[in-house]
Image: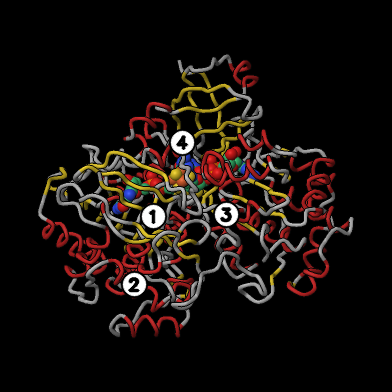
């Protein structure tokens, strides 16, 4: 039996574990006691992460569509088809008629190379990834207020905090090992405030549980800040020495009396005042948030309010404090860090900045690089639906199930002249492709992932990929070579990291040699730099922290007589997004194997629906049939549905309205109606 120390492929918590293999077959997982994040524990997905790897459905050969059928071809033929297809679309419709979707499931090295391929080889900034659907509101909101869109503190800080405020994060199910740390903190006496209208597990450990209406976070947070200011609980010394823009901001929240905030949130004024006083009174308070905050048409405003609240009370830059967006995918932090974003190179260097472009032009062989920011993923899908975008290269994403408004996405993908999908399984999206490229999965390749606390960790190959499947980085280099570009030849992934370090100041001190065991937290600016567990200690990344006034806006679609329920969508403990991996994992699939909707028993009684029966849920976009779960977890008037199940796809219902600044869709609020399935 061989043991390979590597990184969990699921969530951004970034546990490391040992993969156990017998010859070329994975047989199990063992946790590591010494790892700073996992500390001897794993969640059920981690324990079972070996199981999908050897599944018979794995893609093993390249496929090309001929006479309507996907048929096996050689790698040379597949790569030639990709390059001629992309070039032909560009030749007819312009350089920016193609889009690259990168992957938060792929390594840092692979994300860096895909953005190099898009920009250097195909001359377009149209590159993005699932961060658009996830924490794009954070990247915009925290860059503006703090100067950096990443989690400010470390997971270890949970042990030091006096108070933990969790808003819009179902931490025990979605970041389980962080959830456990928060419960342990509450047990040792730290105060816990949870703001989520579902009775999530953390709510049962909370000192206060605020069940405010979906989409009313700006009102809740503004109300809390009004109380803090009007009662003189703000941290004057911090505001004066570390921030700017305070007076205009304070003026903007003056109208948000707790009574007014109560009328927007459905809470009582006392609940809001009480939460504000508790947060302001804590010596050190951490805020954790996730999709309940970001996935709104006012997602950036939500993030601004959170940053304002933390600065108002001086809860930034110290142990046990901070603004901590929990990053979702195992490498979504890395996907952003590597510049798989339409406006940024690696390390958040702007494509619009001529000196940045010059640096990359010199390093990459001189050719001019495109200067205008490209299309975000969501706008690219809209452009395809309009007929303005004709080619897509999708690495490790499954938008037919994960993007909002499925009918719209299907029309967009079908209208493309070329769709290339590089995945480990023949996903619903891959089934529509013209070319399918078989990729190696996490257990079959080397590289690095960056977790939610900015910790860059080493991924180690344990087994060989199935059939002719190759690591994403090898495939990308193959596409570059087929396109006649010879500046993408690497012996191994540590060579790619050397290039990343040379071009990316926050990764400048990173090399694979330094990563084994516990990794390094960026910024890590030179070879001797120990890494940075806490950001903004002496000064904010942008200098002074910036208070930004926010105006309340309701969600784009609210319930009415025709569609009387609020539908909110998200995840469950056992499954991962579009289910490609977890639904092929026996133990996980056994626990949860059918599409369902959570509904309050009072609503069900009124509609004559029983628990476990099938119900039809419809919105202005579509209709699906799912099983009902009657539960007090959701309040009356609110339904919750995970988006894991293709046969009852929540995204057939969701609304494709976007935040105007981050272009994130409003996955957390749409209006629907329900009836018993006939
Ligand atoms: N098991 C599992 N774990 C995962 C994932 C998975 O698919 N499965 N996905 C990973 C990824 S990529 C991500 S981004 C994270 C997401 O992690 P989370 O954001 O924690 O997960 P969600 O279920 O999307 O939503 C969290 C909570 O937001 C609440 N909510 C809904 N609307 C609002 C609102 O308006 N305001 C507030 N305050 N709360 C609201 C919901 O009730 C829900 O409990 O999880 C990661 N971890
Ligand atoms: N309704 C609703 N929709 C949502 C959300 C929501 O809360 N509600 N949340 C959104 C969020 S936060 C996110 S992050 C997105 C996620 O959306 P996606 O990223 O589209 O979802 P995944 O299923 O994680 O897709 C990852 C794909 O990568 C493949 N894969 C795994 N490992 C590898 C690898 O090593 N190489 C390659 N090439 N492929 C690999 C998997 O098989 C899978 O097909 O969904 C979004 N959609
Ligand atoms: S908490 Fe996240 S990283 Fe840790 S084992 Fe579970 S899924 Fe993997
Ligand atoms: Mo996400």
Query: Is disc 2 in contact with disc 3, using a CB cutoff of under 8 Å?
Result: no
Dot in front, 3 or 4:
3
Q: Name the residue under label 4.
A: 650
The correct choice, above or below, for 133 with respect to 672 in the image is below
Image region (quadrant) for ligand 1: top right
Q: Mark 4: which secondary structure?
A: helix
Q: Mark 1: which secondary structure?
A: helix
Q: Where is residue 434 in the image (x, y as percent from the top left)?
A: 21, 51
**Quick one: label 2 or label 3, which is nearer the N terminus?**
2
Assess mark 2: CB under 8 A from ligand 2? no
Q: Nearer the viewer, residue 137 or 2?
A: 2
Q: Mark 1 points at which residue?
A: 386
Q: Name the residue under label 3.
A: 155
Residue found 46% across the figure and 42% down from its top: 42
**Quick one: label 3 or label 4, which is nearer the N terminus?**
3
Crowding near pointer 4: few (<14 within 10 Å), some, many (20+)?
many
Position of 439 with respect to 115 (left or right) is left
Res 44 quadrant in image: top left
Q: Mark 3: which secondary structure?
A: helix
Q: Position of residue 218 (x, y in %)?
A: 70, 51
**Quick one: label 4 or label 2, which is nearer the N terminus?**
2
Q: Mark 2 points at which residue?
A: 119
Dot in front, 2 or 3:
3
């Amino acid at each position: 039996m061989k043991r390979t120390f590597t990184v969990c492929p699921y969530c951004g918590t970034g546990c490391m574990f040992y993969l156990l293999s017998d010859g070329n077959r994975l047989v199990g997982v063992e946790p590591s006691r010494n790892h700073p994040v996992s500390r001897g524990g794993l969640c059920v997905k981690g324990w079972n992460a070996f199981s999908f790897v050897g599944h018979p459905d794995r893609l093993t050969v390249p496929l090309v569509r001929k006479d309507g059928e996907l048929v096996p071809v050689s790698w040379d033929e597949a790569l030639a088809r990709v390059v001629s297809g992309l070039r032909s679309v560009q030749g007819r419709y312009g350089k920016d008629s193609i889009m690259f979707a990168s992957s938060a499931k792929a390594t840092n090295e692979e994300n860096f190379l895909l953005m190099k391929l898009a920009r250097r080889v195909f001359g377009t900034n149209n590159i993005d990834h699932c961060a658009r659907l996830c924490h794009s509101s954070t990247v915009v909101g925290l860059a503006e207020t703090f100067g950096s869109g990443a989690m400010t503190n470390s997971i270890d800080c949970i042990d030091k905090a006096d108070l933990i405020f969790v808003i819009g994060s179902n931490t025990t199910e979605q970041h389980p090992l962080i959830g456990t740390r928060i419960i342990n903190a509450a047990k040792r006496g730290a105060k816990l405030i949870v703001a989520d209208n579902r009775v999530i597990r953390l709510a049962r450990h909370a000192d206060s549980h605020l069940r405010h209406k979906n989409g009313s976070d700006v009102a809740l947070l503004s109300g809390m800040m009004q109380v803090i200011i009007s009662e003189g609980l703000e941290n004057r010394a911090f505001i004066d020495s570390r921030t700017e823009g305070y007076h205009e901001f304070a003026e903007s929240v003056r109208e948000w009396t707790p009574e007014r905030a109560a009328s927007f949130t459905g809470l009582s004024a006392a609940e809001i005042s009480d939460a504000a006083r508790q947060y302001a009174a804590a010596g050190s308070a951490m805020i954790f948030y996730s999709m309940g905050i970001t996935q709104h048409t006012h997602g950036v405003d939500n993030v601004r309010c959170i940053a304002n609240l933390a600065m108002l009370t001086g809860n930034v830059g110290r142990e046990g404090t901070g603004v901590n967006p929990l990053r979702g995918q195992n490498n979504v932090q890395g996907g952003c860090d590597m510049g798989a974003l339409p406006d940024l190179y690696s390390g958040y260097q702007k494509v619009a900045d001529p000196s940045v472009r010059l640096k990359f032009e010199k390093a990459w062989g001189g050719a001019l690089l495109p200067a205008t920011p490209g299309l975000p993923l969501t706008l690219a899908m809209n452009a395809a639906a309009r007929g303005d975008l004709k080619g897509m290269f999708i690495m490790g994403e499954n938008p037919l199930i994960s993007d909002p408004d499925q009918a719209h996405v299907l029309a967009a993908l079908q209208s493309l002249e070329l769709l290339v999908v590089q995945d480990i399984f023949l996903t619903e999206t891959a089934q529509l492709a013209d070319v399918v490229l078989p990729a190696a999965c996490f257990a079959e390749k080397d590289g690095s992932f960056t977790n939610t606390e900015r910790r860059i960790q080493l991924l180690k190959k344990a087994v060989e990929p199935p059939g002719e499947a190759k690591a994403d980085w090898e495939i990308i280099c193959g596409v570059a070579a087929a396109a006649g570009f010879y500046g993408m030849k690497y012996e191994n992934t540590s060579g790619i990291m050397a290039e990343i370090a040379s071009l990316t100041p926050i990764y400048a001190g990173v090399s694979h040699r330094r990563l084994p065991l516990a990794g390094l937290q960026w910024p890590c600016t030179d070879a001797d730099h120990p890494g940075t567990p806490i950001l903004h200690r002496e000064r904010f990344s942008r200098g002074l922290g910036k208070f930004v006034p926010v105006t309340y806006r309701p969600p784009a679609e609210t319930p009415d007589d025709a569609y009387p329920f609020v539908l909110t969508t998200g995840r469950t403990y056992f499954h991962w997004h579009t289910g490609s991996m977890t639904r092929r994992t026996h133990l996980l699939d056994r626990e949860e194997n059918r599409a369902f909707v959570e509904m309050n028993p009072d609503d069900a009684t009124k509609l004559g629906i029983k628990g476990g029966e099938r119900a039809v849920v419809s919105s202005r976009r579509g209709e699906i049939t799912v099983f009902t779960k009657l539960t007090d977890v959701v309040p009356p008037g609110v339904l919750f549905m995970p988006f894991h199940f293709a046969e009852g796809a929540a995204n057939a219902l969701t609304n494709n309205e976007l935040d105007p600044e981050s272009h994130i869709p409003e996955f957390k609020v749409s209006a629907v109606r329900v009836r018993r399935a006939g």
